[in-house]
Amino acid sequence: MSGKLWGVGLGPGDPELVTVKAARIIGAADVIAFHSARHGRSISRATAAPYMRAGQLEEHLVYPVTTETTDHPGGYQGAIDEFYESAAARLAEHLAAGRTVALLAAGDPFFYSSFQHMHRRLADRFESEIIPGVTSVSAASAALGTPLVEGEQVLSVLPGTMPVEELTERLRTADAAAIMKLGRTYPNVRQALSDAGRLDDAYYVERASSTRQRVLRAADVDEASVPYFAITIVPGPTPQTRITLTRQDSATERSNPSTAAAIDPAVAPGDSRGEVVVVGLGPGAAEWTTPEVTRALAEATDIVGYATYVNRVPERAGQRRHSSDNKVESERAAMALDLAKAGHKVVVVSGGDPGVFAMAAAVVEESADPQWRDVPVRVLPGVTAASAVASRMGAPLGHDFAMLSLSDRLKPWEVVAGRISAVAAADMAFAVYNPASSQRTWQVGAMRDLVLEHRKPETPVVIGRDVGGPTETVRVVTLGDLDPAEVDMRTLLIIGASTTTVFDAPSGPRVYTSRRYGD
């Protein structure tokens, strides 16, 4: 029996706008498939994350190009067509094996969605069903708080990629219009609105329903800052109520403060308390969370982070908690900065130290965006997982050492392998983070083989799992006997150098890397 393909409409971005049926299918599917650009961040996966379950297979379909040029012999269209064929083949393998596949689609699967290309290539061979979703047009209309059409009025949905002349002509005769696919097309869209005499009646909605939503007059938008996930609305009926615009970014709002609306009623406009504090909770044991971090957690209005770490923070009355999946670092950082910009005191939590393969990098990188340059950001250190594991065995990191991540989600494996070889050749001990996951199991063996090209099989390796947690185990094996099957995402490895020594003590094996070198 073949599996079933589900086209799952997720709505415009707010996880609470996912339908009951979509949530049920996401949780039940064998495979979750989703698209993203080459940066790896998927809005669809972030929206679906609260409804996913542990152990589901994931197919991350990465576009080879979006708006950039390509050297593909078939040009942009050739590269995209080849990508869709390859992506459809990947999903077909799961379907042929009898697995159900939930292919996520922002908005509605049949409304300007990439799902359509997969459906065209798969629906004639496999059973499929579509779960409709709230469209961005509906979400943008709701964000404006004014009717889109009424009575006999006709709504025109127009792509911003149309030639200016044709777009202008359609806008002249439209009762109401929604213009999609903005991004780099926005200068032409604004020109068409102006030429059609509709610019003063048009509104711009960015990332409708999300924590990063912005509502502006179309004439006030900075053309250089328009993302693809934005839409321009020309309502049919004349608005009878005041449309709430986003104060910070609208020139009209700045010159007319009486029309400005507070972003959050709990925080007074102009409140300067807002900031983002990125903290490390330590590896697991409560006593490894520093007093400085504990104070920051107590003072926060909002806690933001991966659900596993948020759950380690004691709940406090009136404090809001924003949990998300561990693969949406940039989206999580942007949400924290938005909250702080609105006057909230936000703490972003990480395990271990936030500056070591954790959230500090994501938050600081996002904060470089001009829209958040004025938001204060602080980083509070924590006990690293490497330090915790090392302490259980003595001092395996007592001399020069390195820290590496085996994850190839944000960098290609070739880069990881090159760094492993370089560190191994330099004869330094090194700590290995993110060694494996449920979908990524082969890298530990590959790392072991690379290191064995430079170090003896007898080299000590410390294996620490859930250190500081209730199921903690720490032991020493040799590099030659390192079994990848014993390593998972909750494990940290320390690979010894030529000067790393193991000896027996009354409490068990003890390990150190000498700070002295022989002749």
Image (cartoon, rainbow, N blue to C red):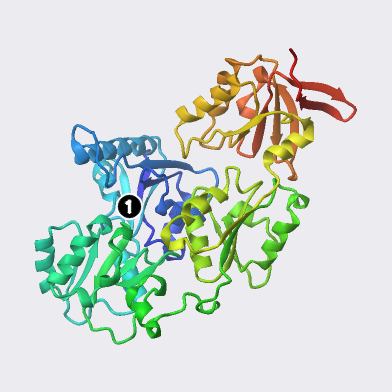
Q: Secondary structure at mark 1?
A: strand
Say few, some or many: other residues with alpha carbon within 10 Å of mark 1 (under 14 / 14 to 19 / 20 or more).
some
The relative height of residue 236 versus residue 508 in the rendered view (above or below) is below
Residue furthest out toward the front: 519
Q: Residue at x 74, y 30 (%)?
A: 398
Residue furthest out toward the top: 519
The relative height of residue 261 versus residue 376 in the rendered view (above or below) is below
Residue 450 appears left or right of 44: right
Q: Residue 18 at what x, y percent from top left?
A: 42, 62
The relative height of residue 330 versus residue 126 in the rendered view (above or below) is below
Q: Residue 250 at what x, y percent from top left?
A: 35, 73
Regarding residue 16, the answer to whether it shows in the image is: yes
Q: Nearer the viewer, residue 240 or 277?
A: 277
Disc 1 designates what residue? 129
The relative height of residue 147 versus residue 105 in the rendered view (above or below) is below
Regarding residue 158, the answer to whether it shows in the image is: no
Q: Residue 223 at what x, y percent from top left?
A: 28, 62
Residue 426 appears left or right of 242: right
Which amino acid type is marked by label 1? Glu
Quadrant into which the C terminus falls: top right
Residue 450 appears left or right of 153: right
